Amino acid sequence: MKKYAFLLIPLIALMLPGCSQRAPEGMESSSQAAPRQLDAQDLAEIAELIAAVNEKAVITDQDMLTAQIPLAAKASEAIKITPKACNVFVEGEIAAELEKMNTISGVLPEDTYLEETEVGISSYGEVADAKANLSGSVGFLNDCSEFTLTLEGQEMEMTLEGLKATTSATHNGAYLVVIDTGGTKINIVSVSGIQGSHVVSVSITGGSDTAKDPLEAQERATAVLEMVSRKT
């Protein structure tokens, strides 16, 4: 398998934040006032606490993420999705979304380069935008639970499954992605939680226990949500 394909795994996780369980009834219509939006300094301080548990941790702040958009766009242009109806997977408006929020992420590498935990925090100016982050792709799991991603002649079969998650957040979402490259299978378990205008997501890539990994992800998400709460 080409190493370039492995570079797509973070992109895959980035493009799937809304592919979660269906939003709870009334979620979209809430008029809840937004708490204070976290700024870059707030997010950096939280990320430092998250990274402290792993000496190999890599932090990506908003400026760094913004700088990667052209590369992500170029990679997206080279990707073919079958069926075409699932092409929304590579057509996300990342730049437009970044305008609505302050964000940071931390990657905690594990034993191999196929194993890692990624923690993302996005703080929006509006509660509605935070909720849209989680529920904007409702129906995607039903319409595109299986599709093929092709890059440079290499095919990856993708299967998505909605999971249930419980964190300290008011709204939660979770999914399992299985990437089959024809001999190598990679699992990505992701749990997201919304608290006010803040979204916390935890993705575990390369895990082998799809029963344990969601529990671990939701526990870590709850811990990060508490860090966020202390800042607001």
Image (cartoon, helix red, strand yellow):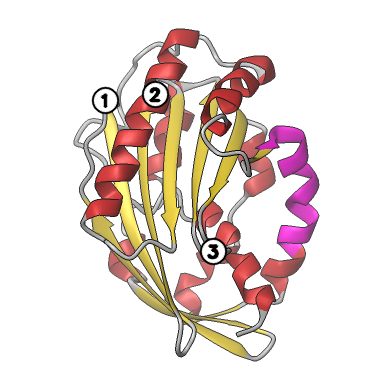
Stretch in magenta: 60-73
Q: Residue at x 61, y 33 (%)?
A: 104
How far apart, in angstroms, are the residues tagged by discs 2 and 1? 7 Å
Residue appearing at x 26%, y 41% in the figure: 23
Q: Nearer the viewer, residue 48 or 192?
A: 48
- Mark number, residue 38: none
Q: Quadrant of residue 25?
A: top left
The quarter holding residue 35 reads top left
Dot 2: few (<14), some (14–19), or many (≥20) neighbours within 10 Å? many
Looking at the image, which residue is at 76% across and 50% down?
68
| Mark number, residue 168 | 1
Q: Type of residue at label 3?
A: Thr
Point out the frontmost of discs 1 and 3: 3
According to the picture, the residue beneath numbered tag 2 turns out to be 225
Which labelled disc corresponds to residue 112? 3
Question: Gap between marks 1 and 3, in whole Å?
Answer: 31 Å
Q: Nearer the viewer, residue 217 or 170?
A: 217
Could you tell me what secondary structure mostly forms the magenta stretch? helix
